[in-house]
Amino acid sequence: LGNVPRLVITPLTDRCYITLTQSLHLIMSGAPAGPAGTGKTETTKDLGRNLGIMVYVFNCSEQMDSKSVGNIFKGPTQTGAWG
């Protein structure tokens, strides 16, 4: 809430916004991919903030199995948030 900092809109972030909102409109999902430190997470969080959808970020490691990942996704999917 309040005056939050915004992401700088570049042609790449604009393209990501359009692609992700189209996939949401089609009841599909999207996963930005690329090298570390390029703003994928921040772009997704900013888009969620603009749409009024809570975004949760989980960093998975090799020690996580499918059951633990499934348990993580149960909560956000039940609340309608993005995970």
Image: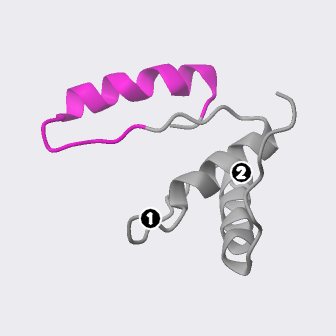
Give me the residue at 32% from left, 28% from top: 70
Q: Residues within 10 Å of mark 1 (few under 14, many from 20)?
A: few
Q: Position of residue 77 (x, y in %)?
A: 53, 27
The residue sitting at 28% across, 42% down in the picture is 60
The answer to which of 4 and 72 lies nearer the viewer is 4
Q: For this rendering, which residue is in front, 2 or 57? A: 2
User: Which residue is under mark 1?
Assistant: 37
Give the SS element for disc 2: helix
Is residue 20 rendered magenta in the image? no
Type of amino acid at the residue the image marks with label 1: Gly
Left or right of 29? Residue 20 is: right
- The residue positioned 66% from the left and 60% from the top of the image is 20
Magenta-highlighted residues: 58-81
Q: Name the residue under label 2.
A: 47
Where in the figure is residue 73, as x and y percent of width and height? Answer: 42, 29
Instruction: Farthest residue to the left: give it.
Output: 63
Residue at x-position 38% and y-position 71%: 35
Q: Can residue 28 be seen in this view?
A: no
| The furthest residue to the bottom | 11
